[in-house]
Image (spheres, helix red, strand yellow):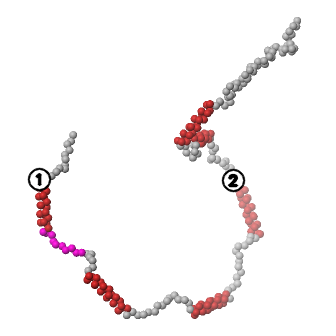
């Protein structure tokens, strides 16, 4: 167990007296140190203009206007020359004369030209060209036919294989479980597939086996109810080896009442 000491406590009378003494000493030190400071005047860098400043500024504007007015008297008047102008009648007449002169020069120059016949570079094939092309096709056919004998017969190797029985069964099982047909089997698909499987098994348990006779029916191959057994004579017929009533006696057996 550890005792906790209280760090914060109320000041005693001695603490108050000591604090007051410390404040007095600090005031004495500051007063003694202030004697060594130099007096400084505060200079205001930004101030509002005085009345004298406003009058001086107005006088400066008036003097500037007077100077500009006196200087404008020494300026020389100059006429403005427009560099871009509309054509005059003389310009239009000179241009028409220039076009006539150009036409005369072209006509005079055309008289010195020589007559030239145009040669067509693109022409129709002649009979020799057609025969040469046919001969080239026959030669090409002969070359291809001769090259066929140098070819080697190769059996094609089919990379694609048919699915096996296991692949088909796997795909059927996947389609049966994938109820929403989204290509992914989820827990809901498993639950629905299990529910369908349970209901199918219950229905099969209550149904008769495939090929079995219905309930109450005789077994396969058994005689119907009331019918004689297989190999037994019909009801009212004589036993095996006994001649029918009124019929001839069997050979070797004397008739009834015979000596």
The magenta segment is 35-44
Which quadrant of the structure image shows residue 104?
A: bottom right
Q: Is residue 39 magenta?
A: yes
Q: How far is disc 1 from disc 2 in space, using C-alphas?
A: 128 Å
Q: Is residue 86 visible?
A: yes
Residue 190 falls left or right of residue 240:
left
Q: Residue at x 66, y 48 (%)?
A: 156
Q: Are marks 1 and 2 in contact (CB under 8 Å)?
A: no
Relative to 102, does residue 220 appear above or below in the rendering?
above
Q: Residue at x 86, y 15 (%)?
A: 247
Q: Residue at x 14, y 67 (%)?
A: 34
Q: Residue at x 27, y 79 (%)?
A: 49
Looking at the picture, how far across and down is residue 177, in whole percent?
A: 57, 41
Looking at the picture, how far across and down is residue 215, in whole percent?
A: 67, 27
Q: Is residue 230 visible?
A: no
Considering the numbered disc 1 on the image, is that residue within a helix, a strand or a loop?
A: helix
Magenta stretch, overall SS: loop
Which quadrant of the structure image shows residue 44?
A: bottom left
Considering the numbered disc 2 on the image, is that residue within a helix, a strand or a loop?
A: loop
Reading the image, the residue beneath label 1 is 14
Select label 1 or label 2 by which is in front: 1
Dot placed on the residue nearer the N-terminal end, 1 or 2: 1
Q: Quadrant of the N terminus?
A: top left
- Mark 1 Cα shell of 10 Å, populated few (<14), some (14-19), many (≥20): few
State the residue lying farthest toward the right.
259
Which quadrant of the structure image shows residue 227?
A: top right
Reading the image, the residue beneath label 2 is 150
State the residue lying farthest toward the top.
259
């Amino acid at each position: 167990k550890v005792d906790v000491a209280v760090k914060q406590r109320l000041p005693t009378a001695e603490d108050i007296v000591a604090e007051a003494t410390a404040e007095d000493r600090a005031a004495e030190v500051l007063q003694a140190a202030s004697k060594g400071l130099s007096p400084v005047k505060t200079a205001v860098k930004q101030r509002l203009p005085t009345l004298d400043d406003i009058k001086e500024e107005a006088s400066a504007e008036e003097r500037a206007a007077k100077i500009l007015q006196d200087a404008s008297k020494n300026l020389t008047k100059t006429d403005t020359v427009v560099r871009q102008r509309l054509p005059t009648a003389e310009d239009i007449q000179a241009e028409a004369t220039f076009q006539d002169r150009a036409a005369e020069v072209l006509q005079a120059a055309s008289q010195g030209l020589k007559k030239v016949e145009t040669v067509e570079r693109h022409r129709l094939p002649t009979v020799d060209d057609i025969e040469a092309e046919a001969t080239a096709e026959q030669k090409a056919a002969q070359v291809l036919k001769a090259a066929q004998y140098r070819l080697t017969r190769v059996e094609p190797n089919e990379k694609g294989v048919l699915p096996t029985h296991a692949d088909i069964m796997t795909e059927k099982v996947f389609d049966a479980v994938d109820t929403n047909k989204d290509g992914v089997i989820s827990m809901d698909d498993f639950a629905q597939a299990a529910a369908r499987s349970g209901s199918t098994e219950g229905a099969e348990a209550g149904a008769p086996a495939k090929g079995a006779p219905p309930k109450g029916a005789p077994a396969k191959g058994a005689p119907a109810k009331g019918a004689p057994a297989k190999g037994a004579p019909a009801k009212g017929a004589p036993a095996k080896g006994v001649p029918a009533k009124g019929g001839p006696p069997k050979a070797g057996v004397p008739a009834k009442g015979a000596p």
